Structures are given as structure tokens and as C-alpha cells.
Amino acid sequence: MNLAEEMEQLARRSREASHALAQLATAEKNAALLAMADALEAGIEPLQAANREDLQVGESLGLTKAMMDRLALDPKRIRAMAQGLRDVAALPDPVGRILDDRTRPNGLRLQKITVPLGVIVIIYESRPNVTADAASLCLKSGNATILRGGKEALNSNRWIARTMVEAGRRTLGERFPDAAIQVVPTPDRAAIPALLSLTQYVDLCMPRGGEGLIRAVTEASKVPVIKHFKGVCHIYVHAGADLNMAIEILDNAKTQRPSTCNAAETVLVDRDVADVFLPKMAARLASKNVELRADPAALALLSDPAVAYPASLVPATDSDYDNEYNDYILNVRVVEDLPHAMAHIRRHGSAHSDAIVTGDAQVARRFLAEVDSAAVYWNVSTRFTDGGEFGMGAEIGISTDKLHARGPMGLEELCSYKWIGVGTGQVRA
């Protein structure tokens, strides 16, 4: 069997499994998830053994220290995975919700009801916990899932998926299909375009990782892809801002966890308050050793002997404003007013998360209305763009697309809907 045939068989089995999963009752799905959680906790030692093989592969590939840390599974992380499954079991079932219910003048009753998407392919790097997280969300929403992690995590991913399926089978018997959760069995990169060409079987692809991975998947795929290429997020400090509040928000957005896609990469400051705000900002961020890349106006203020920013301070280039640093680096730009700030965001932003800090409600409402990002905030850190923080309970990813889903994606975003019509013999004239 060649690679294309192997991927077609994998996808066809997922399609068949998706039909069975769509018929499971809420109680059945929850029972399976709880059994899977118990099985993961019971298998800490064999999972760690599989993970040690992956760590050896990671070392041979020369993975960075950060990537090796993401790859590693210890008992605490495994228990956290298990708890994640229990958390998903506790969430409301997104399937079967009535979104609309109307009766036409001729007596025809129409209902719009949520249904699973079908087969979802998830492509990601390093973190084996994504295997359990993604599979549990897909199961709760009635979808079959095909998982493609990095070759450095293949042993861990296989063990997790196999354990979850076996627990589901023990709990539900033949009602739980073997192909509910599948891991692409080969690290061959050609498997991805082969799998994502199968539009008759695969309904959606969700890549999770860096911009390079997401662009490669998008270019190769013939099925719909939900994506965000990068998170270039902004904090705009308006002239009407409480500057102490602005410092707290900016510090949180930049330094609380700079490696995330919802961390701020640029601060825009109104000229009217720049001479007061920038020294306050410098005093705070210098303690975190944040490198500032400043435009000429900000550079002049931050180079003033009275301010003398003690950490790294360099001139910003135009291309810097397009960068997602995922590091302790912040672009600083002085703007004239709200229209100039919004023009900068339109040009350089990634439609992920952007925030304004101001006490002027009229200005804030204009910003919220005109900045076209997945999440737009008033007096709030961009770090809140997260499924857990939004009260979704869990998140499968963040989308900056406009079609199907936008922003943090939880269970509801893994569903579509269909119309059901009930009549008494009506025919159209």
C-alpha cells in the first residue's frame, strides 16, 4: 500500500467513525471521556516510557531547550491531561442545540439544530498533551479526529490515542468506533498534502504551531483550514487613558507570557501623553529587561538623560511592526490620535487581538467598532484571548479567519448546523 492509499484508508475509516460518534448520547460521550481520563492516569509509567523514546528523537533532531520542555511528559503533566478530559466531560454538549425554531404561514415547522462537523484533522508540533486535548474536544462535539503531531512526539501520541480508544471501547463497546481517534502513523511530510486532498472524507483542518507550519498546511490543503498565521497584537494608549492602568495592562500583555500569540508586540501612544507615559513605561519594563524598538519620537523621549532607558533600546524599522516576537521585545510608536492608531493597526496588525486604554467612552466605542480583529478590548489586556478565560472551558485553537469561526474556538465552534423541516403534507406552489 502506497502513502496515498494509506491516507485514504485512514480518512475513510474516520468518516465511518464520524457517523457513529454523531449518534452518541451526551451521557455516553461523558462516560467515555471519564474512562479515558482514568486510563491516562493509570498509564503514567508506560506513557513516560514512550515519551522517553520521543525525547531521544528530539535530542537527535537538535530541538531547542524550549521545544524539549514542551515535548516532555512528567506525572504532573499527565495528570493535568487527565483532568482536562474530565473538564471537557463536565461541559455542556454542543450537539443538538436548537438555534432557531419557526413555523411558516403554511404550517411548515423549521428548526436549525447544531450537528458535528464530521472529520477534523489537527496538525501540531511537539506537545503530546494536544493529542488528548484535541481528541477530547472532538469527541465531545461528536467528531472523528485525525491527529498529526511532529515526528519527535510520535510514540507519545500513538500511546495516548490508543489508550483513549481502548478506554472508549471498554466503556461503550461497539458503539465506540476504533477509528474515533487516529494518529497519522508516518512522519513522512508527504502524508499531509495526501490527507488534505481527500475532500470526500475530511471536513476541516486545524493547524496549531508557528507561521511556517500554518502557511505550509494552508497551501497544501484542498479542505477548509482554520488558521491564524501570527499574533501581532497592539495596546493603544489614548490621551484619555489612566496612565497607571495603561502601565499595568501593557506590562501584563507583554511580559506575563511573551511566547503566546495573544501577547502584545506593539504599544501605540498618543503624542499628548507620550512624554509622561513613556518614562513610566520605561521604569516598569526595564525591570523585566524588555528590549524596546522605538520610532524616532519615542526614541528621542526614551534617550533623554532624565529617562535613559537602561535596557536595550534600538530604532524600529518598518518591518519590525509586522513581527510576532514571542519574546521580551516591544515596538514603541508615538501616534497623533485615534485615526492614526487605527491606521497603524490596519496596516501592521494580524487581526488577532488589539486593545485601547482610555477613559473616553466615545473614543473607545469607535475603536471597538472600527478595529476588525478577532478580539478587541477596552481597558483590558490582550492576554485574555483564550478559551479558558472566555469561559469556554477548553480551547482547540484561535482563529483569525472570518468564516466558520473567529477568536478562541471551543466546543461550539466544532459544530455546524442543519435545518429540519416538519410538515403535514405541504407542497410548494
Image (tube, rainbow, N blue to C red):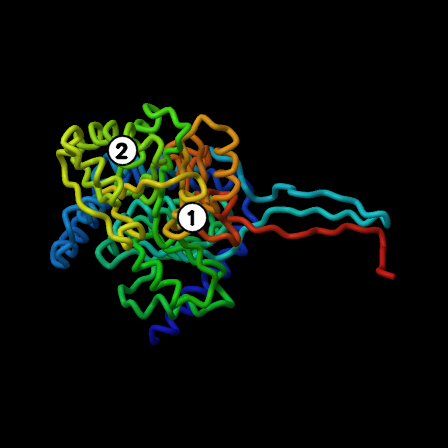
Of 286 and 271, the residue lying toward us: 271
> Which residue carries the number 2 mark?
256
Please give the name of the residue rendered at 31% of the width and 48% of the height, measured from the top-left corner: 160
Please give the name of the residue rendered at 30% of the width and 54% of the height, measured from the top-left corner: 210
> Which residue carries the number 1 mark?
343
For residue 114, above or below residue 357: below
State the quadrant of the C terminus.
Answer: bottom right
Query: Where is residue 268, by image quadrant?
Result: top left
Query: Where is residue 379, by image quadrant?
Result: top left
State the quadrant of the N terminus.
Answer: bottom left
Q: Position of residue 322 (x, y in %)?
A: 31, 52
Label count reads 2
Please give the name of the residue rendered at 38% of the width and 70% of the height, measured from the top-left corner: 194
Q: Position of residue 189 (x, y in %)?
A: 29, 67
- In this rendering, the label closer to the viewer, 1 or 2: 1
Mark 1 or mark 2, earlier in chain: 2
Of 179 and 186, the residue lying toward us: 186
